[in-house]
Amino acid sequence: MRLKTTIALGALAAGAAAAAPAAARDVGGVACTSPPPARCAGEACATSGDLANLGNATDGKTGRKFFLDYPCDLKPGEKVVFILNLHGAGSVGNWQRHYFPAADYKEKHRLVVATPTAATMGAMMGGQGPGVRRWDAAADDEHLKNVTDFVLESFGRSNIRSFWLAGHSQGGFTSSRIVCSDYFKDKVDGWLSLSGGRIGQAPFVAAFGPPQPDGSPPAPRPRPPMGAATPACDFSHVFTVGEHEIETLPDTSPWAAKYGCAARVRRPDIVDEKAGYVWDYQRAGYKVWGTKARPGKAEVFAYPGCRDGRVVADVVRIDKGHTEGLEPKVTEELVKLIVSAPGGKLQQAAAD
């Protein structure tokens, strides 16, 4: 989705909207506020310019901006969970902060969330369509490493209890590509895929993609297997997707099998009475691509008893597509899954 034509917001959570900013000591030279900075409410976000804000922190090696959100009441030496949050093709970092608003729970669940923006413009949807901003190895991988190094140096490697990659759409595919790379494999403890591929692929529907200009569905076409390869390193894996994006959710997982997990169990459904923040404003007519953000329900499937306590789970958002921002309760459920998983790779590296 292109930022100029597709961004709008749902209502902010009432508590976050009403809370007064709370100042804290700076970490890494980045001031902290709660609620997080550069937030906006309702349709005003389409014109306010807030979502075009590239961040409150700077990659010192490239000068590129990114967002850094962390607990404003952080204590020296306190352990935190670090999430590197990657947007999808055609988006930017601050849209991703609203699509998956983990930063809303930074105090409650002791999170550090870094949200960068891709530098590159490339063809979307397999080479078809106009150029859009998307992650590219040559242009962006060093920046992702720099952002990670900034967080590790600012908060202390030994204080990062666990480190997760989270990515929507092409940001999820990028997370899958880098998670076992030489730089990340001994750092990352988990990968949250936000409609960005599953280990043991959930097949996408044939007519996946944005609607045509007249609002009709895109023409069906074969889609490449995305996220199907089995990674060569160890980490927890949570997959979430809109019901209308996939043909079906597999009831088994090769990643769960790898860690000797028990058969999947269905947890209680999550019911949200509030909408998410963002959606694809001008193309919100084709349910596979996504409609206007609204309240919803999500089904949660977990594979219990995994070796070493690893977390493997799937979350299906009912009657949702690719671009509706996540509602508050399902966002927190994903954060809880992340926080419940074991970490320790960075702490072990610091000890060594």
Image (cartoon, rainbow, N blue to C red):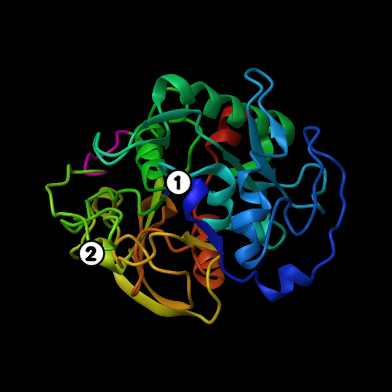
Crowd class of label 2 (few under 14; some 14 to 19; many from 20; radius 10 Å): some
Residue marked by disc 2: 249
Q: From the viewer's perspective, is 318 left or right of 329?
A: left
Q: CA distance from mark 2 to mark 1?
A: 28 Å
Q: From the viewer's perspective, is 115 left or right of 224?
A: right
Residue marked by disc 1: 2
SS class of the residue under badge 1? loop
Q: Residue furthest front?
A: 214
Q: Quadrant of residue 152?
A: top right
Q: Is residue 140 visible?
A: yes
Is residue 35 highlighted in magenta?
no
Q: Nearer the viewer, residue 133 or 283?
A: 283
Crowd class of label 1 (few under 14; some 14 to 19; many from 20; radius 10 Å): some
Q: Is residue 157 visible?
A: no
Q: From the viewer's perspective, is 316 left or right of 135?
A: left
Magenta part of the chain: 227-232
Image spot of residue 184 (x, y percent) = 46, 30
Kind of residue at disc 1: Arg
Specify the principal SS of the magenta part: loop
Image spot of residue 50 (x, y percent) = 67, 50
Q: Nearer the viewer, residue 267 or 249?
A: 249
